[in-house]
Image (spheres, rainbow, N blue to C red):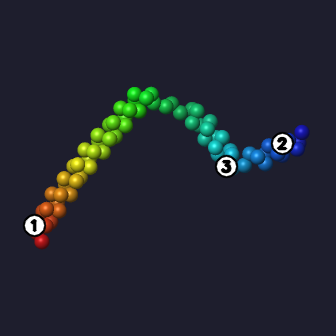
Amino acid sequence: MARVEVLKKAQDNRVVRYFRETWFELKKVSWPTRSEAVNLTLIVIVVTTFLALVLGLMDWVFSSLFGLFL
């Protein structure tokens, strides 16, 4: 009986324990529905595109103004 416990502990190293605990924690997660995930993804894409355009425009304006001073 003791030999089985020793073998079990030998197999249960840090890596195995890490993945086992990770798996159990992922089971506890409240995942969004598919429609929620799609909506949130679209929001992220729209906001990212908008900010990229605004920052690109600001960069162009400041580059042009800086070019006038030189």
Measured from the top left, where is residue 60 in percent x and y? 18, 58
Residue depicted at x 17% and y 60% = 62
Residue depicted at x 13% and y 62% = 64
* Separation of marks 3 and 2 at Cα, in angstroms: 18 Å
* Separation of marks 2 and 1 at Cα, in angstroms: 78 Å
Looking at the image, is mark 2 or mark 1 earlier in the sequence?
2
Looking at the image, is mark 3 or mark 1 earlier in the sequence?
3
Three-letter amino acid code at the position of disc 1: Leu
Seen from the viewer's position, the closer of residues 47 and 38 is: 38
| Numbered badge on residue 15 | 3
| Numbered badge on residue 5 | 2
Three-letter amino acid code at the position of disc 3: Val
Residue at disc 2, secondary structure: helix
Q: Which residue is mark 1?
A: 68
* Separation of marks 3 and 1 at Cα, in angstroms: 60 Å
Q: Is residue 31 above or below residue 20?
A: above
